[in-house]
Structure formats: structure tokens, C-alpha cells
Amino acid sequence: MSSLKIYFIFIFILLFAAEDIHSQEKLTLQQAIEAALKNNLDILIEKNNAEVAANSNTIGNAGMLPRIDLQASTNFGNNATKQEFSSGLVVDKTGVQSTNLNSGVYLTWTLFDGLKMFASYKRLQELEVMGQLSSKIQIENTVSQLIITYYDVVRQKQLLKGLEENLSISEERLKIAQKKFDIGSGSKLEVLQAKVDKNAQISGLFRQRTILSELKANLNQLMARSADVEFDVEEEISNEFKLKYEEMKSSMEKNNSSLQLLKSNIAVNDQLIRESRSQLFPKLNFNANYLFTRSQNQAGFALLNQNLGLNLGFTASWTIFNGFNTNTQIKNARLQIENASYEYNNSKQLLNLQLHLLFKRYQDDAKLLELEEENTKLAKEAVDIALERFRIGSSNSIELKEIQRSYEEALTRLAQARYNAKVSEVQLMKLNGEIVK
């Protein structure tokens, strides 16, 4: 395929892409976050799990309320009956029919169970808190991933813009080389090399558009919408560098969701010890029932027996010995709470280490970004000078190509520096529990 055909194909693609971008929705970061919070399936699952824990947090589930049952049964019999009484009366019949009817309302209410019900209710409250924290952690993970992906799309868009800018420089270089060749002051080699370099940049531009398209599909997936939905993003990555180390260090223990979850786990295990200890105490239940019974037989001493009435009573029980099972449960519960404390302290140490390392990277990213911004300005100025020198014949294409390559690398490093700084900021905010308010 000739260079002219390649050129026209490229121009057509650029025009089509420009029209496509113009018609795309402008998706802001806030809109992307709102869509993920509303539609992301992982978030919705954790929200439902948190609601399950909240629904389970009731005094009835803790055993504080009575239980009422309604029961009814009936039986029919057809038997052969033979009875001999002390009076000498003998009953010997076949086909004797009998019916029995029983119905009633039964109430059972635990009045004292060694305070187990109160420990259970406290444990259910902590489990509800843990459910909310688990949901929050999932939201934080999804939102932080979404923010990083969003700014990665912005970064790739900036790289695409840089490639387009460099392509325009290459086109200008080709025009100058061709003009020099036409008037006899340049060589055919410079024209050919300029065409080869321009075609290589077109190829790189195609690859960059593919990378951008793939990242947009990933962002769509986080928002739980079709992967082929087209959209545009913001033009720049804003970096403000307002985070303070001492402030984050003092507030991380209080705000970090993972630490709060481990703290709640300690509280849950503490209530499990109380529940196990309750088995050492006696139990007292209140029982009540209102019953109706009717028994009718065609033979026997009592041909009809019917009762209707209220019955009340108490049941007391005390397990004196159960093979030391209660003591074993208490010991194991203590070990569990000890392990939960170890996990909390270990996570706290690791989070402090992560904070130290991430903040150091955050500070380095700020310095690197400042340096790359300056380098990019210098590289742009250098390429403008080199292009003009090439135009007037003061330099050759090799020198211009090298300076142009330096400018392209500077643009790439600048986009990467902006992205790295934003990633460090997001990770620090997530660590400090500030990624989701």
C-alpha cells in the first residue's frame, strides 16, 4: 500500500474518531462513582449481607422473647378389646372404635439463662456493625479501583493526544523534507525516512486507541454497564498534594475500616465468652398452655374423657457436669479473643508501615511531577527550535528525529507522573478511610 493511501486512511480514521468523540457523553469522576455505588454488583451483594445482619439483630433472635406454639392432632382407631375387671365384669368386643382430639396453645419463656440472652443480643449488635463495615470496605475497594481506572483512562487519553501532536510534527517534517527534495536541496533518503517514521507513529496511534478502548471497557464494567458504551473523560489529572502525614497517622486508627472491623471482631469474641459462661448457671423457664382434649371409646371403663383449661408452671434446670465441655468452650473462646487481638495489632502495625511507605512515595511523586512538567516545557521548546532549524537547513532529519523522540518520551513521563501521583493519593485516602465519606 502506498504512503498516500495510508495517509488518506489515517485522515479518515481521525475524522471519524473526532466525530465519535464529539458525540460521546462526558463522564465525570463523580458521575462514575455514583453509577458504581448504585449498580456495581459486588457492592449490592455486600449491602444485602449487611441488611441480613441488621435484620438478625433483634431481641427475639437473642432469646429474650417468649415462644408461642399452636398445636392440634386427632386420631381414629378400630380395635379388638378384651378387658377383665376385678368385679368380674368381662368386656370382649371386636370393631371397637375410638377417637382422640388434642389441641392447645403453648407458651415457653426463658426468664433466666445465666445472662446468655444479653450477651447474644450484644453479639448481634456487633455483627450488624461488622456487616456495615464489610459493606463499607467493599465500597472503598470498588471506588478506589474505579478512581484509579478512571484516571488511567485520562492518562491514556493524554498519551493519545501526545502521539497526535508528535504525528503533526512528523507530517510537518515530511512536508519540509519533500519540499527540500523538490527544489534540489534535500535528499531522497530524508523523505523516505520521514515517511517511515510517520507511518510508525500512525501504527503507535492505532495501538494507543486500542489500549484506551480496553480501559474504557474496564471502567464500564465497574459501573455495571455494557462494555461497549462510549464516553469521554476529563482532559487532565489534577494533583494538589494537600495530605499531611501527622494528620493521617493520628486519624488512621479511628477511620480505617479494616481496623474497625477487626475491633468489632474482638467485641464479638468477648460476647462469645459470656455466652459460654452462661452454661455454668441455672436456667429458669416459665411455661403456660391452654389445652382442649377429648377421648371417646366404644368400650372400656371410660367411654368419654374431655378436658379444657389453663395450665401454668415453671421449669428450673442446672447442668452440674457435662464432661468439662463448658470449660473447654470457655478456654477456646478466650484463645479466639486473644487471636483477634493479635490480628488487630498486626494489622495496625502493617497499616502504619503502609502509611509510611505510601506517604514517602507520595512526596517523591510530587517532586517527580514538578520535574517532568519542567522537562516537558523544555522538550517542547527544543522540538520547536529543531523543527525551525530543519526548515531553514541548519540541521538534518536525524537531529530533529532525536529531539522529537525526547519530546515524546517527556510527554509519556509527564502523563505517568500525574497518574502515579493520583494513585498514591487515592491509596492514602483509602488507607485513612477518606475515600468514601
Image (spheres, helix red, strand yellow):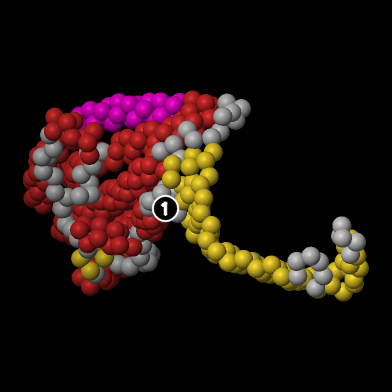
Main SS, magenta region, reads: helix
Amino acid marked by disc 1? Leu
Where does residue 294 sit, x and y in percent of width and height?
66, 69
> Residue reaching furthest front?
87
Which residue sits at x=22%, y=62%?
A: 31
Q: Check the image and report above or below for 229 versus 389.
A: below
Question: Is 348 in the magenta?
Answer: yes
Q: Where is mark 1, residue-wise?
A: 65
Looking at the rendered image, the quarter that the N terminus falls into is bottom left
Most foreground residue, 250 or 203: 250
Which residue sits at x=26%, y=54%?
A: 150
- Residue segment shown in magenta: 334-361
SS state under label 1:
loop
Where does residue 131 sit, x and y in percent of width and height?
36, 48
Q: Check the image and report above or below for 336 versus 202.
A: above
Where does residue 38 sit, x and y in percent of width and height?
30, 62
Tell me the quarter of the picture where residue 215 sits: bottom left
Question: Is 406 in the magenta?
Answer: no
Tell me the quarter of the picture where residue 256 sits: top left
Which residue sits at x=47%, y=33%?
A: 281
Q: Is residue 59 visible?
A: yes
Q: Is residue 272 visible?
A: no
Most foreground residue, 168 or 15: 15
Which residue sits at x=38%, y=33%?
A: 270
**Left or right: where does residue 324 sit relative to residue 186?**
right
**Left or right: where does residue 437 sit relative to residue 89?**
left
Classify mark 1: residues with Cα within 10 Å, few (<14), some (14-19) or many (20+): some
Q: Check the image and report above or below for 157 versus 113.
A: below
**Left or right: where does residue 351 sit relative to residue 326?**
left
Most foreground residue, 358 or 172: 358
Where does residue 242 sit, x and y in percent of width and height?
10, 40
